[in-house]
Image: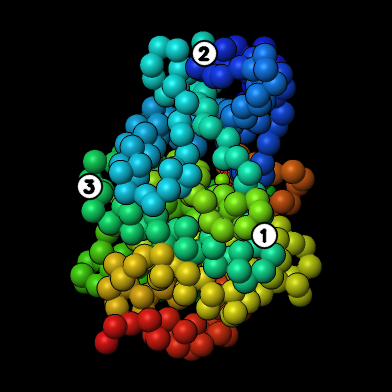
């Protein structure tokens, strides 16, 4: 995505109804998609107000106004459901009363209240923190269990449609735009060898054992805010990809990212595996948060959700590498390849722990 310059950023901020006078704007966070800034304002009496400003990536989100419609609709609904107002992030209005500002250069801007006294974890440091992330995403499922999913826009069509992702991946291999395919044959073979697995969730849905629900679809630990002092879960952020989907993929994406013993782009693969205790604690927190909403058949598919999200992400990173790194933000050449390799290592490790993963989730089934 193009980067906005200072003038464009300043102009964007002026359109939002903020408290106080803007004193600083700094790039913020480690997201792979949007450009995020922390905006700090002060009132004359010294009161400080902080906001998050984002340029929504409109290469990724082709209809960003629909993204905002989803977010506002879900946030409004959540306000009527949550136990504490801190569980919902406030979207800031523009002076014209809307929730976004599109400038004449094509940048699409929005602002949120900064979640005060909070942290988010690029890697959960311990089991307790990961448990808290799980509770937050589980509650998110529970709060939205009666939300009319069909009223949401599909902001990225086929987002977690793994068979479709696999077809896109095969196309990227076939085209080999950058001439990189030969050097990653082992990774390509690994992904191709598991082709039979990719339709499993969609087939389970067709068979009636995996219902369509409202899902977050991007449940990384850095999309949950925890209280700065107590490390208790406060709220879920990054609602861009809320769409109809599966509970097990929300669970799975969190395992992919948070139950890994290393960063998503760790180069030393001997450091990368799926920590089974992290898996167990996340299953406990997520299912507690869901408050009994999930069917036994869904619970039994949680391991499939974890493996599916991990291999899907692996093929997405590799496809982007083969296509010249145009989707995910990268910081060096080969960044997407390093990310792909950690995902494939995690998949292999999950396969070796499969029976244990099934055993862990089975204890939560009602029958
Ligand atoms: P991306 O889609 O690029 O991941 P996010 O919406 O997740 O964008 O924002 C990136 C990062 O910015 C988050 O991981 C978090 O650190 C921070 N962030 C986003 N929204 C807020 C908020 N309302 N309050 C505090 N921090 C936030
Ligand atoms: C992106 O936006 P962010 O950084 O939370 C991506 C996810 C991937 C993730 C991999 C809209 O998430 O699907 O799983 O990177 N988001 C989008 O880290 O594609
Ligand atoms: Mg994010």
Mark yes or no: residue 31 visible.
yes
Q: Whole-Å distance between the Cαs marked 1 and 2? A: 35 Å
Label 3, secondary structure: give it. loop
- Tag 2 or tag 1, which sits nearer the N-term? 2
Mark yes or no: residue 325 visible.
no
Residue holding disc 2: 15
| Viewer-nearest residue: 4 or 129 | 129
Q: Quadrant of residue 291?
A: bottom left
The colour style of the image is rainbow
| Viewer-nearest residue: 219 or 186 | 219
Q: Position of residue 293 (x, y in %)?
A: 29, 67
Residue plotted at (79% across, 68% down)? 268
Image quadrant in which the N terminus is located = top right
- Tag 3 or tag 1, which sits nearer the N-term? 1
Graded by Cα atoms within 10 Å as few (under 14), some (14 to 19) or many (20 or more), the crowding at tag 2 reads: some
Residue plotted at (28% across, 56% down)? 145
Residue plotted at (29% across, 83% down)? 366
User: In the figure, 147 relative to 301: above or below?
Assistant: above
Label 1, secondary structure: give it. loop
Is there CB contact under 8 Å for labels 1 and 3? Answer: no
Graded by Cα atoms within 10 Å as few (under 14), some (14 to 19) or many (20 or more), the crowding at tag 3 reads: few
Residue plotted at (30% across, 44% down)? 80
Residue 148 is labelled as 3
User: In the figure, 19 relative to 300: above or below?
Assistant: above
Is there CB contact under 8 Å for labels 2 and 3? Answer: no
Residue holding disc 1: 123
């Amino acid at each position: 995505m193009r980067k906005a310059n200072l003038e464009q950023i300043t102009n964007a901020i002026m359109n939002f109804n903020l408290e106080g006078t803007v004193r600083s704007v700094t790039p913020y966070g480690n997201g792979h998609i949007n450009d995020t800034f922390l905006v700090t304002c002060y009132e004359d009496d010294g009161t400080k107000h902080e906001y998050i400003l984002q340029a929504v990536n409109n290469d990724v989100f082709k209809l960003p106004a629909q993204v905002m419609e989803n977010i506002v609709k879900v946030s409004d609904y959540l306000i009527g459901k949550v136990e504490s107002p801190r569980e919902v992030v406030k979207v800031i209005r523009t002076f014209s009363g809307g929730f976004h500002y599109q400038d004449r250069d094509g940048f699409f801007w929005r602002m949120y209240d900064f979640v005060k006294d909070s942290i988010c974890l690029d890697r959960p440091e311990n089991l307790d923190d990961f448990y808290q992330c799980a509770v937050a995403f589980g509650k998110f499922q529970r709060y939205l269990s009666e939300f009319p999913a069909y009223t949401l826009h599909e902001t990225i069509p086929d987002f977690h449609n793994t068979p479709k992702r696999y077809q896109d991946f095969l196309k990227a291999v076939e085209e080999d735009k950058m001439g990189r395919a030969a050097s990653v044959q082992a990774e390509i073979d690994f992904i191709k060898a598991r082709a039979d697995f990719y339709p499993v969730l969609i087939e389970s849905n067709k068979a009636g054992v995996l219902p369509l629900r409202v899902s977050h679809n991007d449940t990384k630990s850095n999309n949950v805010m925890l209280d700065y002092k107590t490390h208790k879960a406060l709220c879920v952020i990054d609602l861009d990809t809320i769409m109809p989907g599966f509970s097990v993929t929300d669970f799975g994406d969190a395992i992919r990212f948070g139950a890994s013993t290393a960063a998503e782009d760790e180069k030393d693969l001997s450091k990368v595996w799926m920590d089974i205790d992290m898996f167990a604690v996340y299953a406990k927190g997520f299912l507690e948060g869901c408050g009994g909403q999930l069917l036994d058949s869904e619970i039994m598919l949680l391991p499939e959700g974890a493996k599916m999200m991990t291999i899907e992400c692996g093929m997405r990173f590799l496809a982007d590498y083969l296509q010249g790194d145009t989707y995910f933000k990268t910081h060096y050449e080969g960044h997407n390849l390093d990310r792909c390799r950690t995902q494939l290592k995690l998949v292999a490790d999950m396969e070796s722990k499969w029976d244990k993963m099934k055993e862990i989730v089975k204890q939560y089934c009602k029958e």
